[in-house]
Image (cartoon, rainbow, N blue to C red):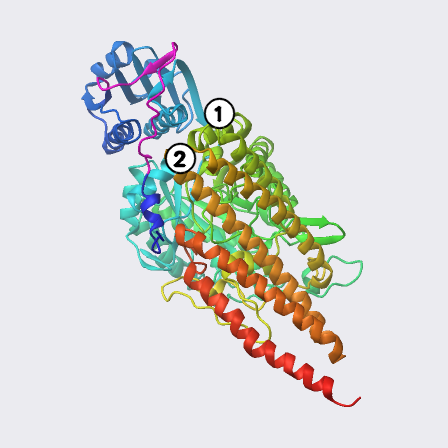
């Protein structure tokens, strides 16, 4: 039966998967079995967070393990006694409550887990540490598929904090179930797009309600600024204006952890003469490039601003007065909340000369946190062509030289360093899927991030943009990688596959994961693809003369404004010309599709031997992988279409044009068949074809629109062109 739009939220709301327990399993000699006579104990003085945590663990046992346990409140002395000598008890506490167990607990969110024969103790450095310890118990029992825990005494600490994500439920929507899932995934912060006090791009949101509910799950809230910074700090109106915006925000919502500042969303009228010195005009989309035309003199730096045909907007350049602007914003915010984080993200000018970027970092004021995107702006040479790594992709592990240069400068300055890592599991490689099932490629990025932590002190991660976050084995691998002791994908991947798909299916699943993780290396991240067919997948149209008007939801923040329906490769100084690049890109994507197809075949073999109770998870991954393959084929077809159209319009002899038109007709029919193959996939899984800021752009309705568009274009513009060729051919020479 087909899912209705947004029905995916029913699945997203399920934090504890029902009936994970395998009744055939028995405890081994070194395992402790939790049964009906057990209870969960917390302190009598424990607050709402700890009570919520205990009830969550109780729910887990009931729903996932079919075990009913009690929750008890104990006095301080009773809690200490329970931790030392109680039987059939799980103690959830903090080091303040159990100081005798605080060895090794010095870092926020760290915890000590002690599993004895008769009792289990989770002692957190703080309440959030106790929470992560409780979730770790769930993780271990999920892998065991039984309420059994092996005896151990281990201290675990997080490698990164904050770990920030946007909502995967809907733009700036955070119901309790989604917050709970985010916390279980090891993340500790969420982001709200902020246009004003209690205002996001989708309208009114009670920030304080979100902050209070998030706190019950150990999650902080950051404001991602969409304020328009209309005054330079030198302006006499600036102080009052920024007090009325940023000041009012933190006065109204003092629980906010901090604010994210990125050039394109909140640039200002800089006085840096290398820029336009103008405030960017407001647009519905916050991500389209501000300029593209570059003049590239020979033997000179093509990114030197003196060569720009159009000077960049201040939001796209490391202006020399950003330190002045940041000082004003920091001081305004800190008057209301001295400990608020002010995070400055250099996303928009990673293309700029290193000297200009590093000069800005060296002049940043105190108490500013620097954030740089991990993989962007890296020039990548492939088979004689040059591409620039655009936002965002997992095809290049990173770090890019832009991030590396800024990480090194941050370390030299003693500035705290964050990065946009996308390790929630999704990038703009394909904008309308819940995650990219390339676990071993993600694992390579996890390892690269850990090295960046060692080399440059990287501490915080932004793990998604507005495409949000979806719980998956990919985000689960990130959780294991981001804690100490470190657990690699090779160590844990097989156990996750066996848990989700069954022992017999696991070899096929692991082979599919390997093939997809290799296939993504052939993906070529380009602006025209990520603002085109890879943004929306098989619903992307084939345009001949007229750019189709794509139907979008009236309530979408970006809708169809965030992609272009007339495909045109970029031709600028940052990449090889489109005419040179496209054949290489087609060849690489064709190879990608072949490997991906073999991975899909492995999933089909896995489904044939998968236990019935695990079939739903298997079908979901199989459908996602097939949809991804359809999107790759669409992008190949779009590139082939562009090449044929370019040849057609360049041809001067009518006799030579007719074969090209016929080839275009065959290609259009092949793409219609590909789009038709995607329809049952999106009908089976309503998350496919949806993205929070665009809403539905790739569901069955939009794919059918695309099919109709291609058919109409063939009957109309293309047929008219064919008739013109025939008429010209009949004229006397």
Which residue corresponds to the image point at 29% horizontal and 22% vertical from the top-left?
A: 93
Vertical order, 430 against 447 (above or below): below
Does the rendering let one see residue 417?
A: no
The one nearer the camera, 401 or 684, is: 684
Marks 2, 1: nearer the viewer:
2
Q: CA distance from mark 2 to mark 1?
A: 31 Å
Residue 403 at x, y = what percent?
Answer: 60, 44
Say which quadrant the C terminus sits in.
bottom right
Sequence-wise first label, 2 or 1: 1
On the image, numbered disc 1 is attached to which residue? 484
Q: Quadrant of residue 698?
A: bottom left
Residue 537 at x, y = what percent?
Answer: 51, 57
Residue 246 at x, y = what percent?
Answer: 38, 54
Residue at the extreme bottom of the image, as rendered: 732
Query: Quick check: 310 left or right of 365?
Result: right
Tag 2's secondary structure?
helix
The one nearer the camera, 460 or 412, is: 460
Vertical order, 545 against 174 (above or below): below
Vertical order, 79 against 491 (above or below): above
The one nearer the camera, 143 or 630, is: 630
The main secondary structure of the magenta stretch is loop
User: Which disc is residue 693 wearing?
Assistant: none
Q: Which residues are magenta?
A: 15-38
Q: Is residue 48 magenta?
A: no
User: Which disc is residue 614 wearing?
Assistant: 2
Residue 399 at x, y = what percent?
Answer: 61, 41
Mark 2 residue crowding within 10 angstroms, few (<14) / some (14–19) / many (20+) = some
Query: Quick check: 561 left or right of 556?
Result: right
């Amino acid at each position: 039966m087909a899912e209705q739009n947004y029905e995916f939220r029913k699945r997203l709301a399920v934090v504890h998967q029902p009936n994970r327990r395998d009744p055939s399993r028995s405890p081994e000699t070194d395992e402790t079995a939790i049964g009906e006579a057990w209870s969960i104990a917390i302190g009598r003085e424990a607050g709402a967070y700890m009570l919520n945590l205990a009830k969550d663990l109780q729910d887990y046992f009931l729903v996932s393990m079919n075990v009913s346990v009690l929750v008890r409140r104990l006095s301080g002395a009773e809690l200490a006694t329970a931790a030392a000598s109680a039987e059939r008890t799980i103690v959830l506490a903090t080091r303040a409550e159990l100081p005798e167990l605080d060895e090794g607990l010095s870092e926020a969110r760290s915890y000590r887990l002690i599993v004895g024969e008769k009792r289990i103790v989770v002692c957190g450095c703080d309440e959030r540490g106790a929470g992560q310890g409780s979730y770790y118990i769930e993780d271990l029992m999920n892998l065991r598929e039984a309420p059994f825990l092996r005896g151990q005494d281990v201290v675990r600490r997080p490698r990164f904090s904050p770990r920030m994500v946007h909502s995967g439920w809907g733009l700036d929507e955070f119901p309790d179930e989604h917050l709970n899932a985010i916390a279980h995934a090891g993340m500790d912060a969420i982001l709200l797009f902020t246009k004003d006090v209690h205002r996001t791009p989708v309208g009114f949101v009670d920030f304080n309600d979100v902050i209070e509910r998030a706190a019950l799950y150990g999650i902080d809230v950051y404001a991602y600024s969409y304020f328009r910074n209309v005054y330079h700090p030198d302006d006499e109106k600036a102080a009052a204006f920024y007090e009325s915006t940023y000041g009012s925000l933190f006065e109204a919502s003092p629980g906010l952890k901090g604010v994210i500042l990125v050039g394109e969303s909140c640039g200002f009228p800089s006085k840096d003469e290398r820029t336009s010195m103008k405030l960017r005009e407001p647009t519905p989309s916050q991500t389209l490039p501000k300029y593209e035309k570059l003049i590239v003199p020979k033997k000179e730096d093509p990114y030197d601003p003196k060569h720009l045909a159009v000077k960049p907007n201040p939001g796209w350049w490391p202006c020399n007065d950003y330190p002045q602007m940041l000082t004003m914003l920091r001081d305004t915010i800190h008057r209301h909340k001295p400990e608020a984080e002010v995070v400055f993200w250099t996303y928009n000018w990673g293309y700029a000369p290193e000297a200009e970027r590093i000069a800005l970092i060296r002049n940043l004021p105190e108490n500013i946190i620097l954030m740089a995107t991990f993989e962007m702006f890296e020039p990548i040479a492939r088979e004689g062509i040059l591409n620039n790594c655009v936002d965002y992709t997992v095809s290049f592990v990173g770090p890019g030289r832009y991030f590396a240069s800024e990480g090194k400068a941050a370390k030299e300055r003693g500035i705290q360093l964050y990065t946009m890592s996308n390790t929630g599991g999704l990038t703009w490689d394909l904008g309308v899927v819940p995650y990219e099932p390339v676990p071993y490629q993600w694992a390579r990025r996890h390892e690269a991030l850990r090295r960046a932590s060692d080399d440059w002190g990287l501490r915080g991660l932004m793990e998604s943009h507005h495409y949000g976050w979806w719980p998956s084995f990919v985000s689960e691998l990130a959780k294991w990688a981001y804690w100490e002791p470190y657990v690699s994908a090779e160590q844990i991947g097989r156990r996750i596959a066996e848990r989700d798909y069954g022992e017999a299916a696991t070899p096929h699943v692991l082979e599919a994961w390997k093939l997809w993780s290799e296939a993504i290396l052939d993906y070529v991240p380009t602006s025209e693809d990520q603002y085109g067919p890879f943004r929306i997948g098989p619903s992307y149209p084939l345009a001949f003369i007229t750019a189709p008007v794509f139907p979008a939801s009236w309530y979408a923040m970006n809708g169809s404004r965030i992609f272009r329906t007339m495909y045109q490769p970029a031709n600028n100084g940052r990449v090889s010309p489109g005419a040179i690049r496209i054949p290489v890109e087609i060849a690489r994507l064709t190879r990608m599709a072949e490997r991906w197809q073999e991975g899909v075949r492995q999933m089909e073999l896995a489904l044939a031997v998968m236990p019935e109770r695990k079939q739903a998870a298997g079908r979901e991954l199989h459908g996602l992988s097939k949809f991804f393959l359809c999107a790759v084929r669409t992008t190949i077809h779009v590139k082939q279409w562009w090449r044929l159209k370019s040849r057609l319009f360049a041809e001067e002899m009518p006799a030579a044009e007719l074969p090209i038109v016929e080839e275009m007709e065959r290609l259009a029919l092949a793409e219609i068949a590909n789009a038709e193959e995607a329809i049952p996939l999106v009908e089976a899984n309503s998350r496919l074809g949806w993205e929070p800021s665009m809403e539905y752009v790739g569901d069955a309705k939009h794919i059918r629109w695309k099919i109709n568009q291609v058919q109409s274009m063939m009957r109309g513009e293309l047929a008219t062109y064919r008739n013109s060729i025939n008429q010209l051919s009949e004229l006397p020479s």
